[in-house]
Image: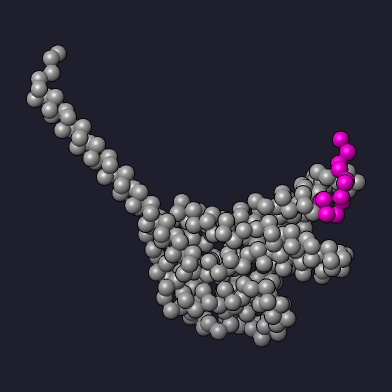
Amino acid sequence: MRVSPKTNSSCLIQLQSLGALLVFMFASLAQAQSQSSTLSESVVRVSPLGEIIAQYPAMMSQGIREGLKQTGQVDPLIADTIGGIVGRAFSSADIRRQVIVDLDEGLNESQLQSVLDWYETPLGERITQAEVAASSPAAWQEIESKASSLMEKYKGTQRADLFAHFDRVSRATESTVDTAVAVQLGLASAMSAFNSQGPTYEQMKAEIENQRFMLRGVVEQQVYAAYLYTYEQFSIQELQQYIDFLETDAGSDYNCVVTNSIQQAILEPVDSIGSQLVRLLNPGGSRAQ
């Protein structure tokens, strides 16, 4: 069939219009992605995330160092060396970038805006300040020293009763236990690969999993003490408002994305840490083939 000039002209106009539409759509998509990314960055900056992430290398290093020393089974010099290895294995900049990417992918623009709006309220700003202050290694020592007195002070109170609800919606105990077990499994894998004299990975894995229930009890007590310490200056009504925010679709998705993102960021360097620990504790050793 012969195509008339008029038909050719019509097709060209349609193609030009389609091209313009596609350019507009891609430009709109890029703009939306840019807005979403900007919102994610703002959420990290305004919420406690930014400051807490910045402290993560020091937090992990200090936590490992003190934990090893408290066992009484590791020379303090070795404990300090291991703490240094752990601290150098984590990059707060990398964790921050990954959290922003995950927030972009896990929350829509409306949800990100809702989270940002909440943290910009007077209560949200106070929550941020309190959580950042309580996350420093120095605060850990104070929480530990005050744990018994705080638990006794609030025993049987509404504040104590509210903890179970707070812990469930924040996933504090759950995510901490999952991360601790995953880190132990990762280190066990590295150790078993280099140590022919010790237990196998499967044996260590079974032992670690068997200790999960006991670990949960210990972690829950630590989280409870931190809860009492961090939010002591907040009224029951304010705590309930915070819980209400965490239970919204935006708050729930935000908390889920953030805890999963940080957990993965913690787990990624585990293999490297394990290998370095093996070389430190067993130089020249290798697993028999």
Q: Residue at x 71, y 65 (%)?
A: 61
Give residue 132's position: percent from left, percent from top: 57, 73
Residues shaded magenta: 278-289
In the rendered image, residue 70 lying in the magenta stretch gets the answer: no
Residue at 74% from the left image edge and 59% from the top image edge: 85
Question: Is residue 22 shown left or right of residue 135?
Answer: left
Is 228 displayed left or right of 98 in the figure? right
The residue that appears at 70% across and 52% down in the rendered structure is 270
Q: Foreground: 257 or 31?
A: 31
**Can residue 249 be seen in the rendering of this structure?**
no
Q: Relative to residue 26, is residue 227 depicted above or below?
A: below
Residue located 38% across and 54% down the image: 34
Residue 35: quarter of image: bottom left
280 drawn magenta = yes
- Image coordinates for residue 33, horizontal then vertical, percent: 38, 52
- What secondary structure prevails in the magenta region? loop
Q: Quadrant of the image for the N terminus?
A: top left
Residue 129 percent coordinates (x, y): 53, 77
96 or 261: which is nearer to us?
A: 96
Q: Residue furthest top?
A: 1
Residue 184, placed above or below residue 149:
above
Residue 145: x and y in percent read 73, 81
The one nearer the camera, 201 or 97, is 97
Q: Is residue 23 left or right of residue 81?
A: left
Question: Count the marks: how many?
Answer: 0
**Quarter placement of the C terminus:** top right
Residue 101 seen: yes
Compared across the picture, whether 64 is left or right of 30 comes to right
Protein image colouring = one colour
